[in-house]
Image: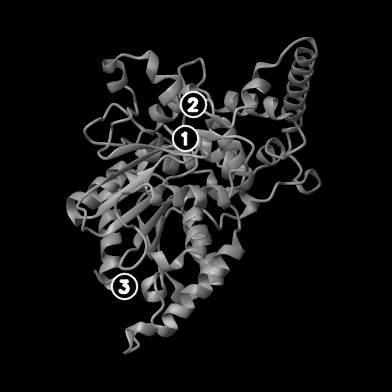
Amino acid sequence: MSTWALASRPQPPAGATATLYLTLGAALGISACLLTTSLLGPNPSKQHQQQPTIPSPLKTHLPDLSPAEIAALPYPPDILPGGRDVATPYGTIKVFEWGPEHGAKVLLLPGISTPCVALAALAEALVRRRGCRVMLFDLFGRGYSDAPQGVRYDARLYVTQVLLVLASSRLAWTGEGGGFHLVGYSMGGGLAVAFARFFAGIVRSLVLVAGCGLVREGHVGWRSRLLYSTGVFPEGVLQWFVRRRLMPRRDGGKVTETRMAAEVVGVKDGEGGEHHKNSDASGGESFDNAVLLARRPEHTVSTVMEWQLRHHKGFIPAFVSSIRHAPIYEQKEDWHALGQLLAARRERSGWEDTADELPGLRGGKILLVLGASDPVIVKEELIHDATAVLGEDGFEAVVLDAGHELVMTKTDEVAAVLANFWSRYVPR
């Protein structure tokens, strides 16, 4: 996403001017305090920023807990089978990989805010019911993955992370006879398109579940445009303010995905458009209260996100940079390039000489799985915009009766839709 210029931001709606002045006043006051502190003595935050990575709770929080306390966390590090901590130049990455070694391989990419545990139920369904070999991991700055500093959290960083994760497996996920199905959820959908554009030959199929990448920038509210513009506030002030916006209220409120989504598309207070005003009913409470794993019903999206917000010091910097730079909004260049790759494969599909067929993205189609009442990814808009860049023959769309939480609340249905698509276009 390109950084927004102040000159291009929309005018605040009526009645919002006072809020804007209060926000600016508070930010200026905090800026003055930080400046005074930096002049009078060492700034711990600057010393912290000099480190190449911000360590995850694996190193900063878990050492202080007993085994029983770790097991009771909303997201314990051994919640899924096949866990490993992969050391990389960008910090440690938490990876989970399990399932039959000879099963169809599936790599799942999570969204902007939740750790990969949000995809755990879908991964388990694919292993249990479809015999797949699955791999999922925490994006940088989420869950138990470190947060690299001094880099943009853009497609280049995340595509590199995917390659590092693939290289960490003892099994061949690429190369002759290799390849894998790529499933991206929410922001992970935009990342999946960016990856497939450059590595189409190893992606057997591409599925976006409530996927970002073509979100219209017109849905970004004026508050978010101002808050996430570079050069307006010092980064320390901005991160403090974002953390304050997202933390639960003292009156017993909780961290909600609706708040996170509001930062991306302005679903809060109708900031980004009329169709988002139903978010409390269709993409708010149902998402926030979604149980991640049936065997742990006491832990929901909300409890995991609150734990992450409190204990991963790299989450807010990663979140802010992702909103600015990750492939969320109107990534038409990536999608046009993907459309050309798909068209080339459709042209060559069915040739008698299979040696002439292009590898990867079999059938020349991708699959979009959408929620009928999703306030973040509006199905009508995505289908319209995907048609414009991929063509009518470049994708199939399946709409389920759900909101943005469909990957958690409609797990079996999503798994069945994926399996049906693979059976028709991707031979085993």
Q: Which residue is mark 2?
A: 312
Image coordinates for residue 97, horizontal then vertical, percent: 29, 45
Q: Residue farthest to the top?
A: 40
Secondary structure under tag 3 reads: helix
Q: Is residue 59 above or below residue 387?
A: above
Comparing 79 with 359, the one in front is 359
Q: Is residue 29 visible?
A: yes
Residue 307, picture quadrant: top left
Residue 263 falls in image quadrant: top right
Please identify the residue farthest to the bottom as the structure is shown.
352
Amino acid type at circle 1 is Arg
Q: Is residue 270 visible?
A: no
Residue type for callout 2: His
Q: Earlier in the sequence, mark 1 or mark 3?
A: 1
At a point 74% along the width and 29% down the height, the residue shown is 234
- Say whether disc 3 or disc 2 marks the residue closer to the N-terminus: 2
Residue drawn at 81 percent across, 46 percent down: 7
Give residue 30's position: percent from left, percent from top: 73, 18
How far is the residue under mark 1 from the one under mark 3? 34 Å
Residue 35 against residue 347 in the figure, above or below: above
Residue 106 drawn above or below residue 49:
below
In three-dimensional space, the C-alpha distance between marks 1 and 2, rounded to whole angstroms, equals: 7 Å
